[in-house]
Amino acid sequence: MLTALSPVLMTWLLAKGTGKPLLERGLRERRPAYADYIRRTSGFLPLPPKRV
């Protein structure tokens, strides 16, 4: 049970918790064009760009 729960928890923490959101917040403040890039691309999976 813990073997399956640990990767799920780690992925959630990186995607929604402390990893990605904190990094993106800092980049949005320093680079205004980065906000548009975030809207167009997938966070972790290499998917085709979204149409905005």
Image (tube, rainbow, N blue to C red):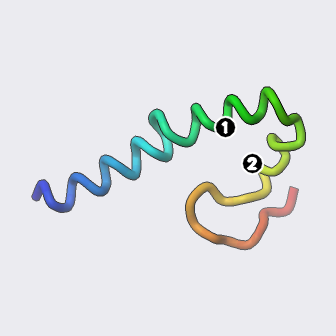
Between 30 and 11, the one nearer to me in the picture: 30
Task: Name the amino acid, label 1.
Answer: Glu
Residue 33: percent from left, percent from top? 89, 42
Residue visible at 20% across and 61% down in the picture:
4
Q: Residues within 10 Å of mark 2 (few under 14, many from 20)?
A: few
Residue 47: percent from left, percent from top? 66, 71
Quarter-wise, where is residue 42 in the image?
A: bottom right
Residue visible at 50% across and 39% down in the picture:
19
Quadrant containing the N terminus is bottom left
Inter-mark Cα distance, 1 to 2: 8 Å
Locate residue 6 relative to residue 20 in the image: left or right: left
Residue 44: percent from left, percent from top? 56, 60
Quarter-wise, where is residue 22 in the image?
A: top right
Residue 11: percent from left, percent from top? 39, 52
Q: Are marks 1 and 2 in contact (CB under 8 Å)?
A: yes
Locate residue 16 relative to residue 46 in the image: left or right: left
Residue extending furthest toward the left: 1
Asked if residue 34 is positioned above or below residue 49 in the image, the reply reads: above
Q: Residue 38 shows which numbered tag? A: 2
Task: Name the amino acid, label 2.
Answer: Ile
| First in residue order: circle 1 vs circle 2 | 1
Between 29 and 45, the one nearer to me in the picture: 29
Question: Badge 1 is on which residue?
Answer: 24
Q: SS of the residue at dot 2? A: helix
